[in-house]
Image: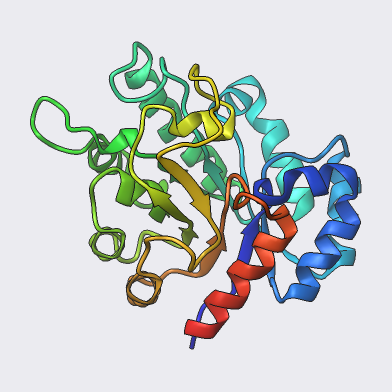
């Protein structure tokens, strides 16, 4: 039996900012069963929880930055318990916090500490990768593997972003199987082109200026280079609980919600 499908709301963030309730209802109508959040769009946790409940979407997970957890982990727990999320994922690390950065050792220690605190409060912590964690350390190991080796599996789970895994040089399906039993949430993301210096300008977190044409561009699921039949089969075999579609920027010439609908329609056609 195929897994339920959620959307990372960052994919439709401008729509959610303008009309959160209407956007969530539209996603439910498309067939999405759940959502992974990336912010509360100016609402309190109680207000946001009510909007989610009325939409019929299951509050699967939330991306919460390491800085937000460092600032007030108790508020993070309170807010997302109110909303009903059973999972929280570290979504991104700044240059100093990531592998090779000055704060990497502290980041690993903090991830372990927050994972233990969240576990005590009924929430599972996962780590959402990009490509830079697939750089190798001085022992020839991927930094991502070192993280998962250092922090126990009962404290930190894998939220594999299949796009960035492939960009980082690994087969997403093989990597899912490597972490069987540890990867409850799987990000399904498609793209065209190749790794480039300006990739992260597309999501507004790079110093490079966004250009009109780039070597790397996001696409709706099924419209790019990924083999999703293989990826989805591996995810199910590995014991995943949710497929989470994510498209950081829409396909050129298309609206965000249009891309979200194209993605779920394709995914349902192959499951």
Q: Quadrant of residue 21?
A: bottom right
For the residue pair 78 and 38, the one nearer the viewer reads as: 38
Q: How many marks?
A: 0
- Front in this rendered view, residue 122 or 85: 85
Quarter holding residue 172: bottom left
Q: Tell me if residue 6 comes above or below residue 155 in the rendering.
A: below
Residue at 63% over, 65% down: 6
> Horizontal and vertical percent for residue 139?
8, 30
Q: Is residue 188 visible?
A: yes
Q: Is residue 159 visible?
A: no
- Is 95 on the left or on the right of 175, as rendered? right
The image position of residue 40, as x and y in percent, is 79, 41
**Residue at 88% from the left image edge and 46% from the top image edge:** 46
Give the percent coordinates (x, y) of residue 251.
60, 52
Nearest the viewer among 216 and 106 is: 216
Display coloring: rainbow
User: Relative to 140, is 20 above or below?
Assistant: below
Identity of the residue drawn at 67% across and 52% down: 253
Judged left or right of residue 46, residue 224 is: left
């Amino acid at each position: 039996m195929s897994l339920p499908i959620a959307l990372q709301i960052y994919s439709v963030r401008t729509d959610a900012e303008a009309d959160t309730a209407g956007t969530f209802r539209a996603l439910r109508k498309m067939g999405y069963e759940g959502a992974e959040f990336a912010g509360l769009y100016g609402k309190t946790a109680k207000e946001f929880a009510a909007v989610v409940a009325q939409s019929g979407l299951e509050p699967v997970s939330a991306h919460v930055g390491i800085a937000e957890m460092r600032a007030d982990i108790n508020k993070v727990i309170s807010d997302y318990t109110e909303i009903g999320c059973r999972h929280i994922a570290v979504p991104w690390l700044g240059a100093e916090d990531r592998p090779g950065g000055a704060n990497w050792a502290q980041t690993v220690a903090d991830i372990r500490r927050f994972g233990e605190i969240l576990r005590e409060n009924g929430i599972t912590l996962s780590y959402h990768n990009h490509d830079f964690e697939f750089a190798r350390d001085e022992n020839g190991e991927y930094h991502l593997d070192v993280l998962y080796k250092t922090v126990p599996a009962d404290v930190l789970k894998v939220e594999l972003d299949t796009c960035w895994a492939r960009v980082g040089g690994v087969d997403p399906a093989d990597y899912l199987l490597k972490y069987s039993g540890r990867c409850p949430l799987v990000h399904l993301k498609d793209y065209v082109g190749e790794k480039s210096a300006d990739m992260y300008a597309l999501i507004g977190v790079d110093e490079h200026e966004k250009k009109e044409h780039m070597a790397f561009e996001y696409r709706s699921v099924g419209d790019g280079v990924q083999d999703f039949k293989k990826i989805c089969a591996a995810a199910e075999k590995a014991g995943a609980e949710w497929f989470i579609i994510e498209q950081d920027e829409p396909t050129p010439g298309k609206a965000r919600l249009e891309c979200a609908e194209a993605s779920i329609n394709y995914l349902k056609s192959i499951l």
